[in-house]
Image: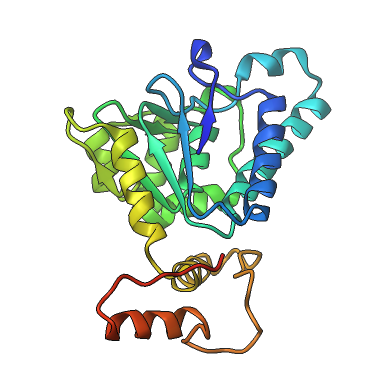
């Protein structure tokens, strides 16, 4: 579980925090014990994005470098060859919205807000990010969202497909997220990651670590165990990562 922890400033990420997030994203798949990644913010907030105040002290060149670090961190997290779940309790704005969309599955609550309030800041959005939003809600809706700086309320986020789950007020998001993670961990890692690679067709760097290069619909190890467990009427034991 990865927690963005800067609650006094709405979990806004500094340059150093973006660097740390990129480093975490690179290290996660190297540990065979990691099977599912949960990304959340502390104190019932996800993240309001980058800490804009820090840019007031940077030159244009330094600001561009900072944005590059931010994009690198988000891209690194998106490319993690493991299932990722975003626990979006609270605002996910600007770069926080982009980071949320880098997760495979997103879970929200009645406190969730999503949007890109950057027009007044003179920020030109990453084309890949904008295209991703347009794939969800269409060109005109995307333009309206950015042009007006409006934030999407929880029900809108769910209806537009930005949230996979929208919890009731009495449901605990941490418990629910962990439960979804446990369900995913029971599945065949090969099957799960093959879907992630196929869905992320525009992101060819996502690969299955144990691929042999042979095109097949059957993983040689997980398929054997899956069939055997079915015949033996038990849960499959997918040990490999």
Tell which residue pokes out farthest to the top in this image. Answer: 8
Q: Which residue sits at x=62%, y=89%?
A: 214
In the rendered image, the vertical position of residue 35 relative to residue 87, given as above or below? below
Closer-to-camera residue (21/67): 21
Residue drawn at (72%, 26%), measured in percent from left and top?
A: 16
What x and y, as percent, mark residue 202?
57, 66
Image-based side of 43 in relation to 27, left or right: left
Q: Is residue 67 visible?
A: no
Question: What x and y, as percent, mark residue 106?
Answer: 37, 45
**Is 106 or 121 nearer to us in this picture?**
106
Is 86 above or below relative to 56? below
Q: Give the residue displayed 41% in from the left and 45% down from the top.
A: 142
In the image: residue 7, left or right of residue 79: left
Image quarter of the C terminus = bottom right
Left/right placement of residue 241 relative to residue 83 reads: right
Q: Position of residue 148 (x, y in %)?
A: 39, 30
- Residue 135 placed where, x, y %? 42, 57
In this picture, residue 154 sits left or right of residue 122: left
Residue located at (53% from left, 28% from top): 4
The quadrant in which residue 74 appears is top right
- Quadrant of residue 212 in the image? bottom right
Image height check: is 174 above or below 236?
Answer: above
């Amino acid at each position: 579980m990865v927690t963005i922890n800067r609650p006094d400033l709405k979990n806004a990420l500094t340059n150093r925090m973006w660097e740390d997030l990129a480093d975490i994203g690179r290290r996660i798949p190297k540990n065979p014990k990691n099977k599912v990644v949960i990304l959340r913010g502390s104190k019932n907030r996800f993240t309001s994005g980058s800490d804009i105040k820090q840019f007031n002290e940077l030159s244009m060149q330094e600001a561009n470098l900072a944005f590059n670090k931010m994009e690198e961190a988000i891209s690194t997290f998106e490319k993690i060859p493991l299932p990722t779940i975003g626990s979006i309790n609270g605002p996910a704005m600007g770069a926080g919205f982009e980071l949320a969309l880098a997760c495979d599955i997103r879970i929200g609550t009645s406190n969730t807000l999503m949007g890109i309030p950057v027009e007044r800041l003179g920020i030109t959005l990453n084309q890949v990010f904008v295209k991703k939003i347009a794939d969800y809600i269409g060109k005109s809706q995307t333009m309206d969202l950015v042009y007006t700086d409006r934030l999407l309320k929880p029900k809108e986020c769910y209806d537009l497909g930005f949230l996979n789950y929208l919890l009731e007020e009495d449901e605990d998001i941490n418990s629910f997220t962990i439960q979804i993670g446990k369900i995913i961990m029971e599945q065949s890692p090969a099957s799960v990651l093959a879907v992630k690679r196929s869905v992320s067709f525009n992101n060819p760097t996502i690969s299955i670590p144990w691929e042999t290069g042979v095109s097949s619909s059957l993983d040689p190890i997980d398929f054997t165990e899956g069939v055997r467990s079915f015949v033996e009427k038990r849960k499959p034991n997918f040990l490999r990562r």
